[in-house]
């Protein structure tokens, strides 16, 4: 097992002081990098561990913040913040670009070899970076199958992988269809995996507070989605020792 170095990085975004988690692989050379976005509740140890796992694979990984260092475990508070955010593509892009600037400024990062991986709101932010024409090598979004403003998906210049639970009430079939129609019309290299029987946030281990209706962990599909993300990175952003 390689040695991973981690540190907390503070940076401004969305009129807040954000607190991200940076994970660095062993060595001193430049490596491909991954911007990792959390679910709507915000950055937690789940995303920090995922960043560390990516660093184990040889990537520089930054798990970014959504709420100024806070984790919003109250569903009403989370929705009050996230719903307006999800309706504002420019605001999502600003949050994503602020974190991306931090990742690009890290000396270990190869600024020309970056992918975005996100869950829920974090996945929607990754998609908006693509729609904004950011130079990304891959985008992976789990549960965050949002559609953008007309025509802007044509700016996405990399493969897009998306995962969703078949029983996800937040991302129902109509939303999935709208997302895939947008990707197809824009000529994006896209894939969608529908995980049979899985609810929203099926990738997220159980939390220490009651989960909202329609949210539930599915360990097998969580592992499958992670393997698909890792395979996407290996294809589009290979690590060369």
Image (tube, rainbow, N blue to C red):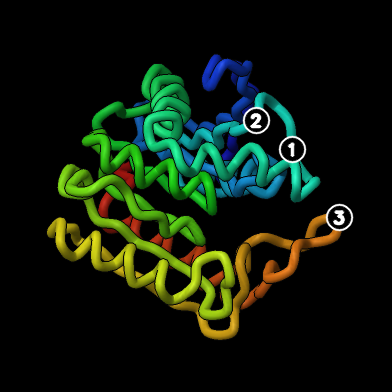
Q: Residue at x 62, y 63 (%)?
A: 201
Locate residue 103, reporting x and y percent: 43, 26
Q: Say which label, 3 or 1, has the lower sequence index.
A: 1
Q: Which residue is mark 2?
A: 67
Badge 3 crowding class, 10 Å Cα cut-off, few under 14, some 14 to 19, many 20 or more, is few
Q: Are marks 1 and 2 in contact (CB under 8 Å)?
A: yes
Q: Name, please, the residue furthest toward the bottom.
A: 196
From what the image shows, is residue 191 above or below residue 197? Answer: above
Q: Which residue is mark 1?
A: 71
Does residue 108 appear left or right of residue 172 in this picture? left
Does residue 181 appear left or right of residue 9 in this picture? left
Count up the numbered dots.
3
Q: Name the quadrant of the C terminus.
A: top left
Q: Which mark identifies residue 123?
A: none
Locate residue 108, reporting x and y percent: 41, 24
Give SS at disc 2: loop
Q: Residue at x 39, y 37 (%)?
A: 89
Give SS at disc 3: loop
Work out whether residue 183 or residue 23 is closer to the camera in this orientation and state it.
183
Badge 1 crowding class, 10 Å Cα cut-off, few under 14, some 14 to 19, many 20 or more, is some
From what the image shows, is residue 17 above or below residue 120? Answer: above
Does residue 228 appear left or right of residue 149 in this picture? right
Q: Which mark identifies residue 209?
A: 3
Q: Say which label, 2 or 3, has the lower sequence index.
A: 2
């Amino acid at each position: 097992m390689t040695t991973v170095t981690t540190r907390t990085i503070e940076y401004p975004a969305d009129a807040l002081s954000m607190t991200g988690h940076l994970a660095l692989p062993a060595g001193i050379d430049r490596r491909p990098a991954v911007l990792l976005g959390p679910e709507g509740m915000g950055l937690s140890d789940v995303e920090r561990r995922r960043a560390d796992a990516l660093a184990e694979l040889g990537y520089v990984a930054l798990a970014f913040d959504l709420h100024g260092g806070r984790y919003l475990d109250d569903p009403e508070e989370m929705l009050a913040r996230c719903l307006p955010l999800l309706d504002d593509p420019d605001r999502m892009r600003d949050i994503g670009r602020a974190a991306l600037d931090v990742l690009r400024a890290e000396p270990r990062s190869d600024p020309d070899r970056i992918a975005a991986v996100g869950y829920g709101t974090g996945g929607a932010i990754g998609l908006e970076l693509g729609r904004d024409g950011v130079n990304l090598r891959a985008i992976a979004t789990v549960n965050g199958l949002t559609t953008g403003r007309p025509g802007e998906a044509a700016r996405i210049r990399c493969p897009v992988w998306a995962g969703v639970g078949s029983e996800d009430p937040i991302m129902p079939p109509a939303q999935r269809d709208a997302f895939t129609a947008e990707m197809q019309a824009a000529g994006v290299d896209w894939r969608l995996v529908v995980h049979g029987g899985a609810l929203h946030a099926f990738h997220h281990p159980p939390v220490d507070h009651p989960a909202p209706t329609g949210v539930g962990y599915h360990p097998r599909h969580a592992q499958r989605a992670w393997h698909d993300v890792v395979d996407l990175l290996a294809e589009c952003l290979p690590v060369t020792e």
